[in-house]
Image (tube, grey):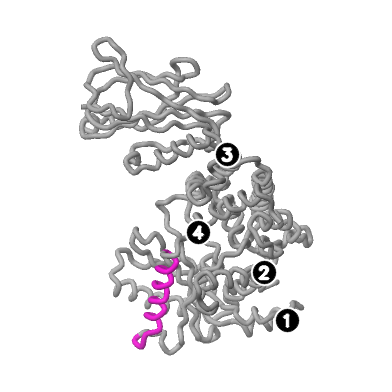
């Protein structure tokens, strides 16, 4: 049983994971589009028609653990399998991939895509319009369950009904790609998804019944993707933490299949996200085995496959995984011990991302008045500043984004003055049409404990500054005033401009002001 503080933290973490997830509309759009592709590949005129092609999702889209990309500009990918009932003994990988590719390209052309279908190592990629914010990777495959079952049993491994769902896939980098030769690469996305679901079956059924009751519908009418268990939410949070920690070392980050598998193995069908995370974080490492000095994380539906096989040839992968595991344990355990929402937000903003944490707090405030209402004034000011930064009018191309890791737990405010006829007058948000060729000065106040560094950002817009090639948006280290808390400028170009102040302590951005607009006539 969670106490009140734990319930608050649990609700906050759930909200963050919901925000990290794709929207229901995005899910429905993706469903419609991959169904459309499947229908095209199976149409009577298709060269695949006689081989009963079936299209289904795989990976995080199938597991319900999709998260949005770190950048809003990036697309998320929908991984699909195109399973065709042909014999791999009679056909090469190349024949299969070319046949699927021919139909994918004809679908692309028939539907007037702006960009051509692209061939990758294993998949064909369909790139939708920028507004769709996703692309689809189509993996050609053939059924391979019977052979896989026989192979595993011959090696002494136990098999299950999940093994029957194995497939053979294509890889154009393999030497036998163009020949009728075995073995083909193997995979089992449906079997893995079935295993993953079995690890959360209790909570999945609870969630399904609750959702059906809320919608006044039969449980059979509720799609699996509509139900989210604590395991799925935990995996989403763990993957986002990984993404942020390794955004500058992407090639050596812990891979999602390892995080997902270990999390599912460690999950004990806890009924809430807080307890699920605690159980997972304390149990993941126990499911990594050591065999002859090599780390082994077995594929639960193909025990002959080791998800950690690359750790031996690239020790950095193993080192980074354990570094991440130590860090994520600390970060979430610290969060579990926070005394108030301010501390929680301060700590997680730099671990799960500024945008989802801010949006979570905003939604949490709207839906849980009694909880956020008790947040100290400091965090309220931080939230108000964050709301301002996100306004569309402040998103201009030449404005640089903060270059420091961010953990906003201090406040900084700025005020400005303009010198007119020898007298200094205050600049406020309502001040319009300031005259040109006047002196400006800005003062900052912060509750940050010294030592710290102060940076000022001056952003100008308008044709006047553009013609003079003086569009600005860089960071300037403060040198004037006590601690750099003063900055001077002049009114030179007509347009809407603004000033912001940033306080950096120990290499981390700890305070950021809201923009102070300077409108020059």
Q: Position of residue 371 (x, y in %)?
A: 56, 45
Percent from the top left, x then y, of residue 264?
Answer: 66, 64
**Residue drawn 47% across and 76% down?**
94
Q: Is residue 297 above or below residue 193?
A: above
Task: Kindly tell me whether residue 325 is visible in this rendering.
Answer: yes
Calculate the distance from the C-alpha at mark 2 to the C-alpha at mark 4.
21 Å
Outermost residue, bottom direction?
Answer: 50
Which of the image's four quarters has the C terminus? top left
* Residue underneath mark 3: 342
Instruction: Give the mark nearer the N terminus: 4 vs 1.
Output: 4
Q: Do the residues labelled 1 and 2 touch (CB within 8 Å)?
A: no
First reached walking from the N terminus: tag 1 or tag 2: 1
10 Å crowding of disc 2: few (<14), some (14-19), many (20+): some
Task: State which tag comes first along the sequence, 3 or 4.
Answer: 4
N-terminal-most mark, 1 or 3: 1
- The alpha-carbon separation of the residues under discs 1 and 3 comes to 55 Å
- Measured in 3D between alpha carbons, the distance from the residue under mark 3 to the one under mark 2, in whole angstroms, is 34 Å
Which one is nearer the viewer's eye here, 339 or 315?
A: 339
Q: Give the range drawn in magenta.
A: 26-45
Quadrant that contains the N terminus: bottom right
Of badges 1 and 3, the one in the foreground is: 3
Q: What element carries label 2?
A: helix
Of 8 and 465, the residue lying toward us: 8
Q: Work out whether 300 lies above or below 71.
A: below
Q: Is residue 319 visible?
A: no
Q: Name the residue under label 4.
A: 21
| Residue pointed to by mark 1 | 153
């Amino acid at each position: 049983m969670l106490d009140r503080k734990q319930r608050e933290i649990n609700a906050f973490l759930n909200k963050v994971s919901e925000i990290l997830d794709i929207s229901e509309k995005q899910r429905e759009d993706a469903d419609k589009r991959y169904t459309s592709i499947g229908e095209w590949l199976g149409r009577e005129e298709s060269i695949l028609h006689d081989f009963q092609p079936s299209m289904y999702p795989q990976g995080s889209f199938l597991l319900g653990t999709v998260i949005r990309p770190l950048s809003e500009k990036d697309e998320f990918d929908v991984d699909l399998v195109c399973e065709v009932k042909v014999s791999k003994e009679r056909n090469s990988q190349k024949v299969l991939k070319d046949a699927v590719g021919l139909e994918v390209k004809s679908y692309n052309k028939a539907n007037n895509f702006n960009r051509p279908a692209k061939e990758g190592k294993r998949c064909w990629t369909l790139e939708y319009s920028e507004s769709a914010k996703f692309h689809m990777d189509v993996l050609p495959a053939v059924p391979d369950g019977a052979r896989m079952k026989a192979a595993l049993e011959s090696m002494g491994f136990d098999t299950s009904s999940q093994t029957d769902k194995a497939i053979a896939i294509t890889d154009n980098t393999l030497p036998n790609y163009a020949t009728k030769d075995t073995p083909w690469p193997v995979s089992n996305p449906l079997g893995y998804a079935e295993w993953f679901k079995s690890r959360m079956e209790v909570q999945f059924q609870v969630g399904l019944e609750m959702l059906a009751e809320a919608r006044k519908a039969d449980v059979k009418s509720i799609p699996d993707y509509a139900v989210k268990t604590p395991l799925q939410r935990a995996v989403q949070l763990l993957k986002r933490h990984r993404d942020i920690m390794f955004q500058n070392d992407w090639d050596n980050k812990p891979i999602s299949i390892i995080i997902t598998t270990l999390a599912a193995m460690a999950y004990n069908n806890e009924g809430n996200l807080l307890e699920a995370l605690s159980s997972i974080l304390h149990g993941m490492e126990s499911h990594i085995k050591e065999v002859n000095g090599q780390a082994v994380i077995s594929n639960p539906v193909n025990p002959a496959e080791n998800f950690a096989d690359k750790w031996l040839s690239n020790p950095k992968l193993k080192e980074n995984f354990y570094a991440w595991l130590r860090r994520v344990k600390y970060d979430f355990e610290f969060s579990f011990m926070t005394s108030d929402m301010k501390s929680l937000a301060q700590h997680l903003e730099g671990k799960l991302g500024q945008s989802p944490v801010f949006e979570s707090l905003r939604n949490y405030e709207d839906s849980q008045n009694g909880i956020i209402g008790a947040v100290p004034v400091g965090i309220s000011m931080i939230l108000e500043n964050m709301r301002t930064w996100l306004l569309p009018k402040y998103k201009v191309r030449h404005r640089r984004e903060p270059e420091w890791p961010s953990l906003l737990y201090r406040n900084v405010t700025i005020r400005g003055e303009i010198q007119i006829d020898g007298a200094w007058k205050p600049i406020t948000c309502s001040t319009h049409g300031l005259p040109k060729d006047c002196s400006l000065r800005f003062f900052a106040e912060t509750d940050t404990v010294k030592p710290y560094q102060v940076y000022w950002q001056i952003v100008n817009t308008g044709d006047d500054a553009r013609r003079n090639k003086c569009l600005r948006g860089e960071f300037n280290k403060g040198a004037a005033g006590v601690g750099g808390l003063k900055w001077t400028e002049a009114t030179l170009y007509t347009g809407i401009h603004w000033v912001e102040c940033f306080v950096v302590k120990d290499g981390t951005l700890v305070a950021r002001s809201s923009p102070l607009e300077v409108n020059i006539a």
